[in-house]
Image (cartoon, rainbow, N blue to C red):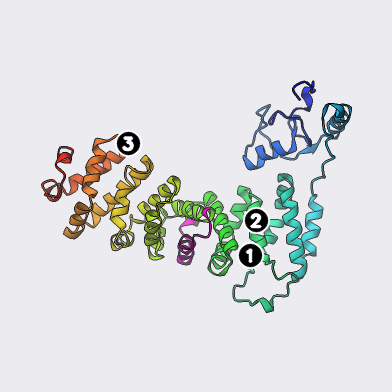
Amino acid sequence: MDEIDVPPFFICPISLEIMKDPVTLSTGITYDRESIEKWLFSGKNTTCPVTKQVIADCELTPNHTLRRLLQSWCMLNASLGIERIPTPKPPISKAQIVKLLIDAKSPQQQIKCLDTLKSIAAENATNKRCMESSGAVEFLASIVCNYDPTATEESLDYEFDSIKPIDEALSILYSLQLSEASLKNLMGKNGDFILSLTRVMQRGSYESRAYAVLLLKSMAEIADPMQLINFRPQLFIELVQVLHDQISKQASKATLQLLVSICPWGRNKIKAAEAGVVPVLIDLLLDSSSERRACEMILTVLDAVCGCAEGRSELLKHGAGLAIVSKKILRVSQVASERAVRILLSIAKFCATSKVLQEMQQLGVVAKLCLVLQLDCGSKTKEKAREVLKLHARVWKNSPCMPTNLISSYPA
């Protein structure tokens, strides 16, 4: 390829490779379909990469003239090892999607429709956007909302027993990488869709439960606080169960991200504590295989939940609660250290019984906080550590359990 003189207008401005399916934006610039779709839809950019103009209309127009020139050039240079570019399959039309949805009336037709929609979505991002604008999201959401976990296999008249509409519908919904407008529409259905996802998490397959969590995470990211505070206690119970069951790394990560975003709002931290999230999070911290980012999110959720009395009580009830939180300080990252020290500050402020203070001393928590003051671990972390130590200096500073090499670090 280095020896072949490739006409510059055959090169995609994004990938810098020969285009296979040239399409033109409203700005007049031509790109390879795969590259510009990734830029616009996966990257969620709103400007033309070349002109930097804002793109009001994301419609991609096939550049047939350039494609034919490309194919002719490839044939002329076949002897040099250039392969002919095949004529790309045209994107699906809105009318085709609408007809497909209208025809899906019986359970058997629904299964076939879902199978076709899955294939269409897998082809390219343009098809996904076409599906989204043609009512496919509403169709898929209706299947989720009509999910009946009490129905027996015999009562469901499906042609293919191995295929369950709820699994397919959730899989396709997630694969569509829904726009903010569609996610807001799902959030705005008076909580019905979230309630349906909760039912799926309660009684659905591992696959459905994982997709339900992933969709909830996407929806929570665009929701306003008033919507977040209305989450029901049952949802938190199911989220905790997903963490407990360790369905998959992706599902666990999405659950932690969801809890990070929703726990600070309203009474959510209390709902999470009452759902049993604290012992599950502590057990995850005790698992030495936890990755850095996962550990940071676990401590962030614990910090939020320890903002309520129920959360602090659950932490102290767990035999390894204080010990594992203290252990993570200075061992994971600055973020993890700060969150862990914040948790200890909550305990020191609101649960400072003589038994708790003695336990913190014996477990080495006080010594670890003194060590924080000696090392470079961030000003916020040091400030919180100093506050904890000052709160109970009369109990801890002159204790025989205090290491002599750290006494000098104890704040005055």
Looking at this view, is 248 or 343 the one in front? 248
Q: Is residue 170 left or right of residue 22?
A: left
Looking at this view, is 182 or 390 the one in front? 390
**In the figure, 2 relative to 136: above or below?**
above
Query: Which secondary structure lies at badge 2?
Result: helix
Percent coordinates x, y for residue 40 in the rendering: 66, 39
Query: Which secondary structure lies at badge 1?
Result: helix
Q: Nearer the viewer, mark 3 or mark 2?
A: 3
**In the figure, 203 relative to 117: above or below?**
below
Looking at this view, is 306 or 295 the one in front? 295
Percent coordinates x, y for residue 363 in the rendering: 23, 53
Mark 1 closeness class: few <14, some 14–19, many ≥20 residues within 10 Å = many
Q: Nearer the viewer, mark 3 or mark 1?
A: 3
Query: Which stretch is magenta?
Result: 228-249
**In the figure, 70 relative to 212: above or below?**
above
Mark 3 closeness class: few <14, some 14–19, many ≥20 residues within 10 Å = some
Residue holding disc 3:
378
Residue holding disc 2:
173
Q: Is residue 398 left or right of residue 32?
A: left
Residue holding disc 1:
144
The residue located at (77%, 63%) in the rendering is 112
Determine contact: label 2, label 1, CB under 8 Å.
Answer: yes
Report whether residue 410 is seen.
no
The residue located at (79%, 59%) in the rendering is 100
Q: Main secondary structure of the magenta part?
A: helix
